[in-house]
Image: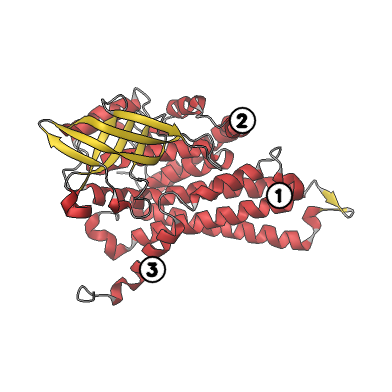
Amino acid sequence: MVTWQMAEEQNRLLRESVRQIARTRVAKRAAEIDRAGVFPWDMAELFAQQGYLSLMLPEEYGGMDGSITALCIVAEEIAYACGSSSLMILAHSVGLMPLMIAGNREQKAYFYDRVAKGHALAAFALTEAEAGSDAASLKTVARAEGDFYIVNGRKCFVTNGGAADLYSVFVTTDPSKGKQGISVLMVEKGTKGLTIGKREEKLGMRGSDTTDLIFENAVVPKENLIGGEGRGWELAMMTLNLSRPAIGAQAVGIAQGALDFALEYATKRVQFGQKLADFQGLQFMFADMATKIEAARALVYKAAALLDEKVYERDRMSAIGVDKLSAMAKCFASDVAMEVTTDAVQILGGYGYLRDYPVERMMRDAKVTQIFEGTNQIQRVIIARNLFKKFWTKDVH
């Protein structure tokens, strides 16, 4: 049995290890990855070798038997150096979560082996052009035919889309049932009828591979159905509740990177005969930036710790309110990241606006953390519903 003290020591050692990799190897590539706007395969291989792609897998399947807290640590430390590289790990982990939650032993043995030994990347395919925040309106259809599902439809904004080998694809197996008719299939690259769409050009996270997935009579074995028909919506919501603190951790890492660079700059840059760090107005800015980052970090790791206690299980989630904390962590941390990175650009003045300095990249990378995994407006809806839940009854319509 892993005690609290053992877990704390494991997390401390993990953070030290990831931080060393991020500062000495990932940071050197960050600007080039952003400028080129291409998927960093060298980083993917590095992360596979370090075990970050197998972080969440059980040890019996060749993984590191990691936790949500461990995922947050990796996301934060890598994002400190490079947002795109951090997103690769996050999207991969999210793509595997439906399998982790509801996959059977045969499915886990097969797909986990591809990850642990074959260094396969995963992706999460839920969003569609007409089903973004309203994800339950998805139209991709899977029709049962013998031992297979025939899949037709199109997914968009799939992170790791062109680089992944495995996809958690959310489909409707019974359109008449609405969200209760949604299911999830594990689909492999190379599946007949699956085409990778164009790579999107983005404001930030430019090294991340974002594409459409196009299904035209794609043939997927029924044995790739995760958790049974009709469980897709439940698994999507459970996955997002698990992953949102990690998005918050990514945002914290980006914000911390921007703050640290601005601090160092302020101790060297001289204006009006004194260093920027000596101006009280800027000192107040730095104090606010640091305080908000620490508050965001505390919220992120509180949510992660509760998730690691298994309180995300369906029958306990409402009572504990972890979905609320998960939404708060993602929402608050990403808002802080946007604010801090914008302030960092302001502190550097004209130099902050130049690509010679990293804070403009960090500001561009921070923006999407307010959007993906559910926009921050949707997070506020989730938080508010939890706050008012005890006042509402099933009799109110």
Q: Amino acid at mark 3?
A: Ala
Q: Residue furthest right?
A: 273
Residue 328, placed above or below residue 253: below
Q: Earlier in the sequence, mark 3 or mark 1?
A: 1
**In the image: residue 341, left or right of residue 311:** right
What is the spatial separation of the Cα atoms under label 3 and label 1, in whole angstroms?
36 Å
Query: Residue tagged by mark 3?
Result: 384
Residue bearing mark 1: 263
**Identity, as a three-letter code, of the amino acid under mark 1:** Leu
Mark 2 or 3, nearer chain start: 2
Which element is circle 1 on?
Answer: helix
Q: In the displayed structure, does residue 59 sit left or right of residue 358?
A: left
Residue under pointer 2 = 32
Q: Residue 164: percent from the left, percent from the top?
A: 38, 30
Callout in the foreground (1, 2): 2
Colour mapping used in the image: secondary structure
Image quadrant assignment for residue 303: bottom left
Residue 253 horizontal/vertical position (percent): 55, 46
Query: Residue 293 versus residue 331: which sits nearer the camera?
Result: 331
* 219 to 70, vertically: above or below: above
**Position above or below: 147 against 336:** above
* Rendered residue at 22%/58% (across/down): 315
Element type at marker 2? helix
Mark found first going from the N terminus, 1 or 2: 2
Q: Quadrant of the C terminus?
A: bottom left
Mark 1 vs mark 2, CA separation in Å: 23 Å
> Regarding mark 3 in the picture, which secondary structure is present there?
helix
Residue 133, placed above or below residue 192: below
Say which of 174 and 369 sits in front.
174
Of badges 3 and 1, the one in the foreground is 3
Task: Name the residue: 32% across, 31% down.
Answer: 166
